[in-house]
Amino acid sequence: MAESIAFSRSADRETIYREIVPQLEALTSGEADVVANLANTAAVLKEAFGFFWVGFYLEKDGQLVLGPFQGPLACTRINFDQGVCGHAYTTKETVIVPNVDEFPDHIACSSDARSEIVVPIRGANGTILGVLDVDSDRLNDFTETDRKGLEAVVRIVERFTQSHTNSERIE
Ligand code: SME
C-alpha cells in the first residue's frame, strides 16, 4: 500500500482533485476496513488542500455522529434538522455555504469556521449513510470546483462503504 500521496503543491484545486482521486481509489480499494478508509480519506484531503477541518458525520440511531476527521475538536452529534450537515443529509444534496454566519442553523463547532461545503454519502438503496463536511477559516472558500472534486471523492467513499457492508449503516 502506498504510504504517501503525490500532488502538485502549487497547482490549482481542480488539478489537485484530478491528481488525488485516482490515488484515493487505489489506497482504499486495497483495504476493507471502512473506518481506516474514512480516516485516510480525511488525511489525504487535509494534506492536499490544508482545509481547516475535514471529516465525516455518520448516521447512527437517528443522528449524525462524528466519524474520522482532521482538524480541531468537533461537535459529536448533530440532529437531522440542525446545521449544514443536517441540511445536506435531509435534502440529499451537496450544500455550499459561503458565509456560515448567514446560514440560519449553522452549528458553530469552531468560531474560526467561515465557510463550508457538505456532501451527502449515499447507501446502496439511495438512503444517506452520512456526510463529508469540509470547513474553511476563510469566507467564500468553496466553488463548483470543490463540489465536483469532493463529489468525486464521495463516489469513492460510497464504493468502499457499499461494497463492505450489507447494512445501511457504517460501523
Ligand atoms: N459546521 C457543521 C457542524 C460540524 S463542524 O463544523 C465540524 C454544521 O453546521 O453542520
Image: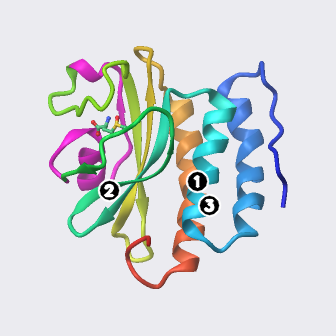
The residue pinned by badge 3 equals 37
Residue shown at the point (53%, 54%) measured from the top left: 154
Mark sitting on residue 39: 1
The residue pinned by badge 2 equals 65
Instruction: From the top left corner, tell me how far across and down residue 15 is, in percent.
Output: 74, 31
Amino acid found under the numbered disc labelled 2: Val
Instruction: From the top left corner, tell me how far across and down residue 58 is, in percent.
Output: 37, 59
Q: For the residue labelled by badge 2, is the local secondary structure a helix, a strand or a loop?
A: strand
Q: CA distance from mark 2 to mark 3?
A: 17 Å
Q: For the residue labelled by badge 1, is the local secondary structure a helix, a strand or a loop?
A: helix
Rendering quarter of residue 97: top left
Q: For the residue labelled by badge 3, is the local secondary structure a helix, a strand or a loop?
A: helix
Looking at the image, residue 61 sits to the left or right of residue 45; the answer is: left
Asked if labels 1 and 3 touch by Cβ distance under 8 angstroms, the answer is yes
Amino acid found under the numbered disc labelled 1: Ala
Looking at the rendering, the stretch of residues picked out in magenta corresponds to 80-101
Q: Residues within 10 Å of mark 2 (few under 14, many from 20)?
A: some
